[in-house]
Amino acid sequence: MVFLHKNNKFYKANIMNPISKAEENHLKAIFNLCEEFSKPASTNAIAKIMKTKAASVTAMIKRLSEKHPALVNHQKHKGASLTETGKKIATNLIRKHRLWETFLVEKLNFSWDEVHEIAEELEHIKAEKLIDRLDEFLGRPKFDPHGDPIPDAKGNFTFRKQILLTELAAHKTAVVVGVMDDSPSFLQYLDKLNLVLGAKVKILERIEYDGSNRILLNDKQEQILTNKVCQNLYVKTL
Amino acid sequence: MVFLHKNNKFYKANIMNPISKAEENHLKAIFNLCEEFSKPASTNAIAKIMKTKAASVTAMIKRLSEKHPALVNHQKHKGASLTETGKKIATNLIRKHRLWETFLVEKLNFSWDEVHEIAEELEHIKAEKLIDRLDEFLGRPKFDPHGDPIPDAKGNFTFRKQILLTELAAHKTAVVVGVMDDSPSFLQYLDKLNLVLGAKVKILERIEYDGSNRILLNDKQEQILTNKVCQNLYVKTL
DNA sequence: TACCATTTTTAGATTAATCTAAAAAATATT
DNA sequence: AATATTTTTTAGATTAATCTAAAAATGGTA
């Protein structure tokens, strides 16, 4: 067993150190930021996601890299990114989150706007066997209730050629496959409009005046959608 | 909002204070000890269950009763017991634990010796709606995979006239309904013997020599069971 | 390039949950 | 009842995760 000596403290350098919930959440935040912006995640940005302060993030990153070397890369003032091992852990958290969301919606009849918070807790349950079995029980789903891809046990995501509804050519039929914004208020609004995953949409007309769109829903119902709604809906052409 | 002043510290006296995992586990330990011995739970006994030290338990009980008044009764050196509110919380934890165990066995095909640890984590997930839905999904089961009663949402347990196999009269047929000892090793041994919940048993002969019992299992198979096994098996006569 | 604004880090505190060692109280034994 | 043993509590530390305020570094702009 190796020991590191930093700041007058000894830390056991051991990957087997269990990773705490707070640490897991920081890893996930760093992962998501790095994926989105393709550059190291800033302490401020991480703090915003974690609802903590930049100083706390600095402390956490320091602890993380001392306690669990080989998870996080970071140089002072240069932001943080994940190593391959770190990415694997973050991906597994996302896998768990999305599998639990799928369970909640498919098996327990939750609606898609209610599941995020609960999955946020469930994803920290450690037993790997539980997740394997859950995955199997759900029929190894590839996408969660918001249309986001569920990585497999090895961390591979299934990609789907999806575009935003704003990018769909007029008069082409497509199917709703996901949302960009998964806030409860947006999801509830979509429910009201019957714009659930799998719904068929065709743009009938784009209105110059206010950027809104007249669409045909499921081959029968006409509907006006604002540009903002269209910018947050992923569709896939048939 | 009321404030209490003790030991130079201020605590918000607010039942709405979220109860931590450690606090919940202490409540559960106190509940179980009080139920089993019908007297206040000693710090030592609690510490043993919690795998901590008596001093830590004292500190925890103090914190608990200052932060969440009306959950725990306790006088110095006299042990701790729960108020009605405290009991309700403990009962709800037991409900969650046993529902999750049922889920793991019934839906995810875990065996009855594997589920305790995982349920120990799952029981701390807070969302009440989740438990209601899970209960419904499982068909509102009354007993968990070990035969222990699952309290309903109001905290009521279903009682069953069950006796230990040691107490069963010879030549009377009964059905295995539960276990007293739910350690993995015992449960795995029972699996080997085919002594699962629902198995039919009849005592053919009690052997003076070593206290063992010759039984008939499921009307066909003869089997020797030690006294220890019989002392840990609950049965119900037909 | 020098200054200013922003971002990040350090320094120093706080709180929850634990520990060990010692003191105090309760219980058991002669 | 006096003493010995056991149990419980107190006192004082530790660690993880957070905070605020202040110092230091970075980056953009005059």
Image (tube, coloured by chain):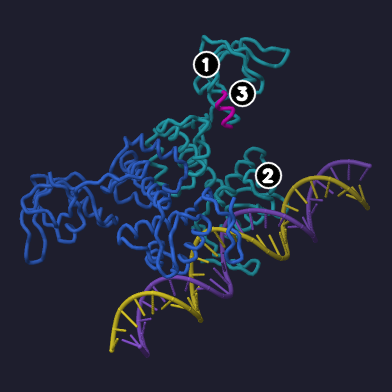
Chain colours: A cyan, B blue, C yellow, D purple
Magenta-drawn stretch, dominant element (helix, strand or loop): helix
Which amino acid is tagged 1? Answer: Lys
**Tags 3 and 2 both on a single chain:** yes
Disc marking residue B29: none
Instruction: Residue at 38% x, 52% y: name it.
Output: B117
Instruction: Tell me if mark 1 has few (under 14), some (14-19) or many (20+) residues whose alpha carbon lies within 10 angstroms of its own.
Output: many
Q: Nearer the viewer, mark 3 or mark 2?
A: 2
**Is B109 a magenta residue?**
no
Instruction: Tell me if mark 2 has few (under 14), some (14-19) or many (20+) residues whose alpha carbon lies within 10 angstroms of its own.
Output: some
**Is A188 a magenta residue?**
yes
Query: Which of the two labelled residues, at mark 3 and mark 2, occupies the earlier sequence position?
Result: 2
Distance between the Cα atoms at labels 2 and 1?
Answer: 37 Å
Secondary element at tag 1: strand
The residue at which mark 1 appears reads as A200
Distance between the Cα atoms at labels 3 and 1?
Answer: 14 Å
Which of the 4 quarters of the picture holds residue B72? bottom left
In the picture shown, does residue B79 fall above or below D6?
A: above
Secondary element at tag 2: helix
Disc marking residue A45: 2
In the picture shown, does residue B136 fall above or below A162?
A: below
Query: Which of the two labelled residues, at mark 3 and mark 1, occupies the earlier sequence position?
Result: 3
Q: Which residues are magenta?
A: A183-189
State the image coordinates of residue B194 (x, y, percent, origin top left): 18, 48
State the image coordinates of residue A235 (x, y, percent, origin top left): 56, 22
Query: Which of the two labelled residues, at mark 2 and mark 1, occupies the earlier sequence position?
Result: 2
Which of the 4 quarters of the picture holds residue B205? bottom left
Distance between the Cα atoms at labels 3 and 2?
Answer: 26 Å
Q: Chain of mark 1?
A: A
